[in-house]
Amino acid sequence: MKIKILLLSTVLVVALVSGYAQVKVTQVEAQVQAPAETEKVLKRKVAISRFSNETQYGKGIFYDKENDPMAKQALDILTTRLAATGKFILLERSDIDKAMFEAEGAEAKRPEVPADYIIVGSITQFGRKNTGDVNLISRAKTQTVEAAVSLRLIDVSSGQIIYSEEAKGSAETKSKTTFGVGGSADFDATLSDKAISAAISQLTENIINNCMDRPWKAYFLVVDDGVYYVSGGKTQGLNAGDLFIVKEKGKSVKNPQTGLQMELPGKTAGKIKITLTGGDTVDNEFSIAEFVEGGIDETQLSKYYIEEAK
């Protein structure tokens, strides 16, 4: 009798310990950290154009493409990831769809977007499945969600897609009962967030590297009585005393292989120093600069651009 009671007690303890619901997320989390306070960062302006849901999941008769909940989830997750780095000024421009680059055409058309880069994303795969396992003394149930996300990064100045990749992520929750004792897992809506987040995490670091590896650029706005006004200001990290290289745009030639126009590397025209920053918003910020080396043709400001000195 004592042996039976002992065995029953052991089974109950095992049931209570093992009968619970757990969530497992399969992902590669990007180690996104804000830059150190002593690190000089010139923030890039990035417009997240849109996130679309290219799957058939959740698309009923009353489906509204402009208010897709999964697409909004993905947009929010990516925005949070990039904002956490402290390296970007994010412009959410979900309304610039019509002005986007016609990347598939023979010529790229540039939209009027006040950004250095545009990100276009889409959820290309999404699925949910339930599996179970039943035996003599226990039952197990697993809910799994799998998602695939595709991102494209476009350089506004050239119209070129400089980065494009797709990543997959999954999340699952398990529940188990033994002799009817244990946890049970109902429909878990948060698994969608976790799976999409897992996929985006794998792409975030590449987005950051592609943006930051390219030199920060600015442009001359106007020359007024010998005073040079430059785009960009304090919000982007510009401060009085900063030095920048001024380059003349390279010759534009047609690539016979692609049929597209491309710009050759620019020639150094001089060097400027920031003397003052002004403006109170990202849209109207400016800097005043003076030449410390070289010079430019003040009547042809569009021929030049300003680049960070590395």
Image (cartoon, rainbow, N blue to C red):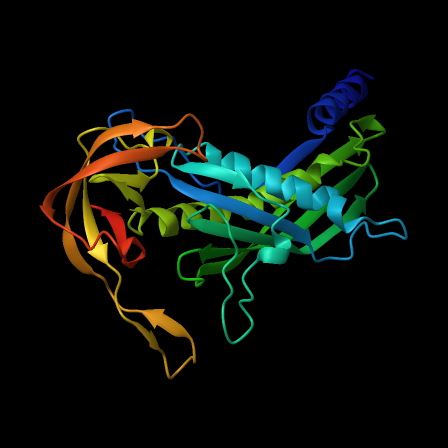
Q: Is residue 250 above or below residue 153?
A: below
Q: Which of the two residues, 226 or 170, is positioned nearer the viewer here?
A: 226
Q: Is residue 205 left or right of residue 194?
A: left
Q: Which of the two residues, 44 or 225, is positioned nearer the viewer here?
A: 225
Q: Residue at x 25, y 28 (%)?
A: 276
Residue 197 placement: quadrant? top right
Query: Which residue, as the protein is rendered here, is positioned at the far front?
Result: 225
Residue 211 in the image, given as x and y percentages of width and height: 38, 49
Q: Which of the two residues, 78 or 182, is positioned nearer the viewer here?
A: 78
Residue 207 in the image, given as x and y percentages of width and height: 43, 49
Q: Residue at x 54, y 62 (%)?
A: 101
Residue 85 in the image, given as x and y percentages of width and height: 41, 34
Residue 18 in the image, given as x and y percentages of width and height: 70, 29
Q: Is residue 125 above or below residue 191?
A: below
Q: Residue at x 80, y 21 (%)?
A: 4
Asked if one can make out residue 310 in the rendered structure from this viewpoint, the answer is no
